[in-house]
Amino acid sequence: VIFASDNWAPASDRVIAALSEAARRGGPAYGGDQLTQRVEARFSELFERPVAVFPVATGTAANALAVSVYAKPGGIVFAHAEAHIADDEAGATEFLAALKVVGLAGGDGKFSPDTLQAALDAVPEGATHRGQPAVVSLTNITESGTVYTRPEMAAIVSVAKSRGCAVHVDGARFANAVAALDCAPADLTWRAGIDVLSFGGTKNGCIAADAVVFFRPEEAREFPFVRQRAGHGFSKHWFAAAQFDAYLKDGHWLDLASRANASAARLAEAIRRSGKGRARLAVEPAANEVFAVLAKDVDARLRAAGAVYYPWQFEFMPLVGRPGSDEVLVRLVTSFATTKAEIDLFGKVLDG
Amino acid sequence: VIFASDNWAPASDRVIAALSEAARRGGPAYGGDQLTQRVEARFSELFERPVAVFPVATGTAANALAVSVYAKPGGIVFAHAEAHIADDEAGATEFLAALKVVGLAGGDGKFSPDTLQAALDAVPEGATHRGQPAVVSLTNITESGTVYTRPEMAAIVSVAKSRGCAVHVDGARFANAVAALDCAPADLTWRAGIDVLSFGGTKNGCIAADAVVFFRPEEAREFPFVRQRAGHGFSKHWFAAAQFDAYLKDGHWLDLASRANASAARLAEAIRRSGKGRARLAVEPAANEVFAVLAKDVDARLRAAGAVYYPWQFEFMPLVGRPGSDEVLVRLVTSFATTKAEIDLFGKVLDG
Amino acid sequence: VIFASDNWAPASDRVIAALSEAARRGGPAYGGDQLTQRVEARFSELFERPVAVFPVATGTAANALAVSVYAKPGGIVFAHAEAHIADDEAGATEFLAALKVVGLAGGDGKFSPDTLQAALDAVPEGATHRGQPAVVSLTNITESGTVYTRPEMAAIVSVAKSRGCAVHVDGARFANAVAALDCAPADLTWRAGIDVLSFGGTKNGCIAADAVVFFRPEEAREFPFVRQRAGHGFSKHWFAAAQFDAYLKDGHWLDLASRANASAARLAEAIRRSGKGRARLAVEPAANEVFAVLAKDVDARLRAAGAVYYPWQFEFMPLVGRPGSDEVLVRLVTSFATTKAEIDLFGKVLDG
Amino acid sequence: VIFASDNWAPASDRVIAALSEAARRGGPAYGGDQLTQRVEARFSELFERPVAVFPVATGTAANALAVSVYAKPGGIVFAHAEAHIADDEAGATEFLAALKVVGLAGGDGKFSPDTLQAALDAVPEGATHRGQPAVVSLTNITESGTVYTRPEMAAIVSVAKSRGCAVHVDGARFANAVAALDCAPADLTWRAGIDVLSFGGTKNGCIAADAVVFFRPEEAREFPFVRQRAGHGFSKHWFAAAQFDAYLKDGHWLDLASRANASAARLAEAIRRSGKGRARLAVEPAANEVFAVLAKDVDARLRAAGAVYYPWQFEFMPLVGRPGSDEVLVRLVTSFATTKAEIDLFGKVLDG
């Protein structure tokens, strides 16, 4: 009964098989192989336009290197204060992109266009000391398990573009967002004005598969050098390509994400059902993350029964969710591999 | 008949099997898994002392992050002018470690203790403008396919330590060096005074397995942060651990390297045999790289027959090897997967 | 009637004379001159212990390079959200020290020990993703014109040291703080546990004189290289030394600061006196900065009369000071060169 | 009898007077003053086209920040191996611009267009591992005291531009080059294809006056941020402007340089005259640096008589100049303040 994180999950059988097959074959190094070419084509097809795509080792690398392309001297990245890029990447963006990250306030993992506007106003044009806006970064699904819709994104993009900012999406769980909204990947990216995406597969059935996707390939012209000097240019590049090939083929990635989302919905339902005094939802879940407030004795019972999950803290607590002194806020993450049995067991222990 | 590079090779069956098994299982993220623990133990056993080991995505990352631990303001890394760290990593060390790389001269991929001493003398203590010596980096096997012996290393280490430099070994092909010298891994590292090693598995049967190995674990105390902020902290850390686990088990890594070295020896013998006017060795090969001077018509014949390899240039050409106007210098790299049939075919075409 | 900033002020006659004399003499470059030696002795005498002192070009350089000495990979500098280092230096600390700056909340330009403790708790030991605490930076006088006393500093230092943080003081207006508290410079620095100080002279009668002062000289061992590679090693080092020599001699620096503080007190008194509906103090001034809320018509009248000053915004507004819709918050800064006549004129126009 | 360096010299009276006057006046901070405006106009007039000019604290800062504008990921700066940017700035360019510096060979402080071409060829387009050419940097006058003529520069520029490199001139002694060639400043810069110049005044009569001059002002659009985040934005910006104002007015800068050059010519003549066995010129001097080979006993005699100068080493020794075992190579630098009496005394001691 593991709800610690989707990166505790195994890989999908198809991904494992594809990687094994590629590994038995080998091939030209540094992306000269055919799998890499095929994956590039798959990404362009998926996003309904030519894109440039570059696998790197981790989501942290994807985020920091993606925004580095839009860096300016004295540049600032605006992101939600709880976003990974602001808070969970050990300063990777400051280090790899020499950008300052300014965290924005907002409940449910989202910041509003007005909040962004106010932050931009605090860095007026020509105020050399303040630095200059460079990038706005959104996380979708958010760190609160909610989802930005296309109109929500477009409203933020509009504010961002008014000051010449590029807009980046941290899509470590992009698949879960697309599955949740049942829309085209293009709708949540370039059609909403997004310039660059961190496309994550690792949390959703891959092994180590994170890529930077540029929606205007000409902006990626120097990215091979960006990737190489950061030590992220795999020599056996087919290693990443094989995973993405299987992941994207026949909508496998969305099947996996849909399963994870469905498990989260089932888990949320168990929590809702459990009734007053036992557990309640802190945020209305939209994808595969469930934030719940548990009575401390329930929490103890669950852990005793072998459930694994993390206690949580929000900097911008949703009002409904604030835990009392005998309660604890926890994060429960489902993956494609979460079973109905696990959830049922969790629900049973929950109900006491 | 592929002699392009050992990073064109497939992975070994054992490595593939181990990775597949780990991938089907999943487990705690960021190194909390059991495979990671086991691999750490394997490395300590291999080197006959406690070591700290950190997988990263590539050999470039291993080199740049390893030396960054010993960085000083205005610091200099001394390395052979043809070393990867100096010439083939797109400025990763300048970028990730803010160190200047000073390239040293020397035939056969090696620089002498005297050459190092002269370079250190050109940066005297207190000469603030010149910067300060920080690291000496050796590549073993070298970029010329030769091998540093323990006494050769110790002589360089002695000069390096006299100015307080840490000594790093780029061991992208460390296995081939150990196999060539038939010695203990410790002999080519800490027993010779080496502080930190880039231990490469990718070119010798792994998929993406490069690690930084610190021989005094206390020097690695901050390395988890170094790795994380550079985007090299794998969430599914078992991905690297599984490869190393199979790679190190039962001496598999040395078996693979020995096979590659034996193939190179066979290839060298074919070249020696081919006779005057056809081909000759540019450097006496010690491991799995063969540098040869081919007559241009022989080169054309080999390529027509499907042989794949790279033309080469040395900055510090071995005297014996300088190609004439109707000749071409080439690099031929063997791997564990190179077959006798490939070499025999190469030899046959060579002989015309 | 210029209250724009103390960096609009001229230099003091003594400083000008000293610089001119040194400039007519010349001398050994890069700090080999006698003035530099004398200034080092003056600083050690001033602080009642041996210190290491390094002039750099600006206060921004002093701050960023000072904290860089205590940088760690993934390191964080904690500072008030309105501190220069957080908000007014175009990302210098992120750039020159590769540190993330985390802004802390607090009225009157100060953060409390509890606020710091909470921020440190959010980056627990071993939480590699979060990075690691490296430095706490205080500004004295603060950006709100208030002053940290020695006990206030000591309380913050105690929290900082409990997590191994170095503590830095941005003393762009250090003279004004010392003059305001009428204490020994040592009391506001190393006796309160401070490790390193940005000592500013530029705003208080010098021309371009900012220095980094280390209270444990051994921590400065590599600073000559830090300074040089950042382009802050003056060849005609006597240029900075001459200024500091005159500035520190016979307490000149404190005389200048006392004059500036006295002018601010007089200005504050004029504002208090002006009466309801005209102007009021937003913060109780302690040194040479006065933050006032002016009625908009009074503001217009003052500007029409030639007064020069900046409108202001606080992120953490003191409750007493929040301007109404027909009011404006402004900053008025006095310098040693501010005259009684200027203040009286300001007061007269204020009173209408 | 000081020939140690021109940065040991005093400042010129006009520069001192101008700075003193500005310092007594004060004025708007950060370049809002009238002197700054006037200096910008003077530079544009001097170079016969609109230029963008930014004072910084040192020549090292000027070089590193100038080239940083043209930086690319994995970018390389090509410069003579003995150039300051390569060898004497403690890694400032690696640090501030994240560029690798590749040193080129060449006698007399110059590299040839062919040498540059060969270095560019070693970094072919698309060779991601090698990085990419970004900037070519020339020093004029060179570190050997020789001068690049306009045609020499144009030949190098042509090679540089063929690979898309910007071309920078380190003009720490630019005045001496212009005086030596008696040409228009434009001839040695943009008319020869130069993009950006480090314009030095510090060694030629100023106190601390180094500026970056962009010949296409639109390329400097982000330079205010570049300067600020490196801590090089003087608050009392008139401090630099006042120096340049006096320096450029009525050709003062060229008068000063001509005096220095004439003194060097006189010194060289004394050396030529001194005769065999005593001293000889190592390089034919073109401006204000004289490299001489002295008999060791002559060297001892000169030092005993109070002469101050540095022993020297060239990496690429001019053939004529190689010192014998009883000789020493020295550098003698003259400044505007060098007197005939000093030279005559030097000559007299030389002649024994």
Image (tube, coloured by chain):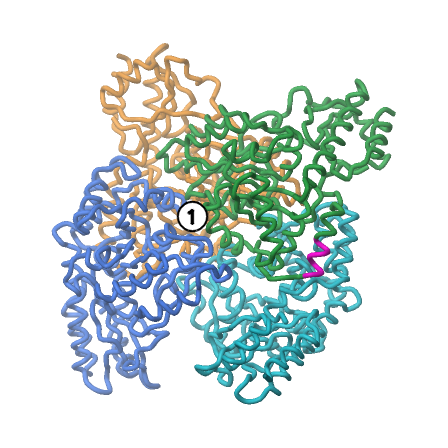
Chain colours: A orange, B blue, C green, D cyan
Q: Residue furthest top?
A: A276
Q: Chain of mark 1?
A: A
Where, quadrant-wise, is the C terminus of chain D in this rendering?
bottom right
Q: Quadrant of residue C109?
A: top right
At 49% across and 54% down in the image, what residue appears? C225
Residue C73 in the image: above or below residue B299: above
**B114 lies left or right of D156:** left
Evaluate whether residue A199 shows in this view: no
Residue A349, x across and y down, in percent: 25, 16
* Mark 1 lies on residue: A212
Which of these two is toward me, C222 or A201?
Answer: C222
Residue C77, x across and y down, in percent: 49, 37
**B229 lies left or right of C329:** left
Residue A189 in the image: above or below residue B322: above
Magenta range: C19-25
Residue D250, x across and y down, in percent: 80, 67
Q: Residue furthest left?
A: B250
Evaluate whether residue B243 shows in this view: yes
**D93 lies left or right of B20:** right
Residue A258, x across and y down, in percent: 34, 33
Q: Quadrant of residue B139?
A: bottom left
Where, quadrant-wise, is the N terminus of chain D in this rendering?
bottom right
Membership of A176 in magenta stretch: no
Most common secondary structure along the magenta stretch: helix
Q: Residue furthest bottom?
A: D276
Count of marks placed on residues? 1
For label 1, the crowd category at 10 Å Cα-Cα, with few meaning under 14, some 14 to 19 and many 20 or more, is many
**B221 lies left or right of D108:** left
Q: Secondary structure at mark 1?
A: strand
**What's under tag 1, amino acid-wise?**
Val
At 27% across and 35% down in the image, what residue appears? B28
